Image: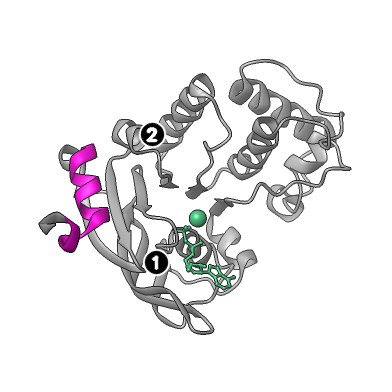
Amino acid sequence: MAAVSVDISHVRKTFGPTVALDDVSLRAYEGEVHAIIGGNGSGKSTLAKVISGVLIPDGGQVSILGKSATTPHEARDLGISNVFQEVLVADECSILDNIYLGADGLLGSSVSQEERARRASALMAELLGFDIDLSISVGELPLSIKQWITIARAILTDPRVLILDESSAALDFDSTERLFRKMREMKQQGCAILIVTHRIAELVRIADRATVLRDGVTVGTLEKDEITEANILALIAGPERERS
Ligand code: ADP
Ligand code: MG
């Protein structure tokens, strides 16, 4: 049995009167792709942010590799990388600087500038499927490349837990294939990957398990052989709609 990478129990998070997460529990294991699914506003992005220490829950426990983090910095030190739903890039900076944005402390001073550039350029070529000049500034680039930059930024730190929040939203079919290939490779190395997506066909292909959120409550976790479009839609919709 693989080790538990992310253990969330009875997490609650409110924003003023809005209850974003009411009662969320899930377990993601080393070396699995765990999908988080649910309708718009069901709390998926809030959960991703709670796991990565960006938001502090009002109640419940979040344990990452047996430890808890209360800041994004601590979460990163535990080995968590989060690709946020909002594509966060600095338009005026180069691709290279964007990839290493905020990563300085992680790689340490032992890694030379040349080595950093070499790693980033190899990874971008693998993800994009073609070579790209990392010195160009990000501003004018298409959204898909900006999205790849945020993904590369998260992967380059060799995370133990990778969270992808709708990260294929701007990617076409072939690009998504390359992302999935990379995810399978990281899985093999023991990384737990949590993906948030509303593209059900995609998660049927890639997910090992899937947890469904409805109105901030986890309503079930499907095992690999139960992950079908019909099962997912039924869980998302809930009992009221099944009856009508
Ligand atoms: P999802 O990613 O599943 O679409 P979110 O986690 O983004 O859902 O949002 C869950 C609920 O919390 C929604 O009602 C949303 O409007 C609310 N919410 C999320 N972030 C904030 C915030 N920073 N301030 C106030 N309300 C928020
Ligand atoms: Mg979201």
Badge 1 element: loop
Q: Is residue 30 visible?
A: no
- Residue with the mark numbered 2: 188
Q: Is residue 70 above or below residue 147?
A: below
Residue at horizontal 53 percent and vertical 71 percent from the top = 69
Residue 189 on image: x %, y %: 42, 37
The image quadrant that residue 147 belongs to is: top right
In the rendered image, which quarter contains the C terminus?
bottom left
- Would residue 239 be found to the left or right of residue 52 on screen? left
Boundaries of the magenta span: 228-241
Which residue is labeled 1 in the image?
Answer: 66
Residue 67 in view in this figure:
yes
Pick whichever, 54 or 216, lies toward us: 216
Dot 1 beta carbon under 8 Å from ligand 1: no
Dominant secondary structure of the residues highlighted in magenta in the image: helix
Indicate the quadrant where residue 74 lies.
bottom right
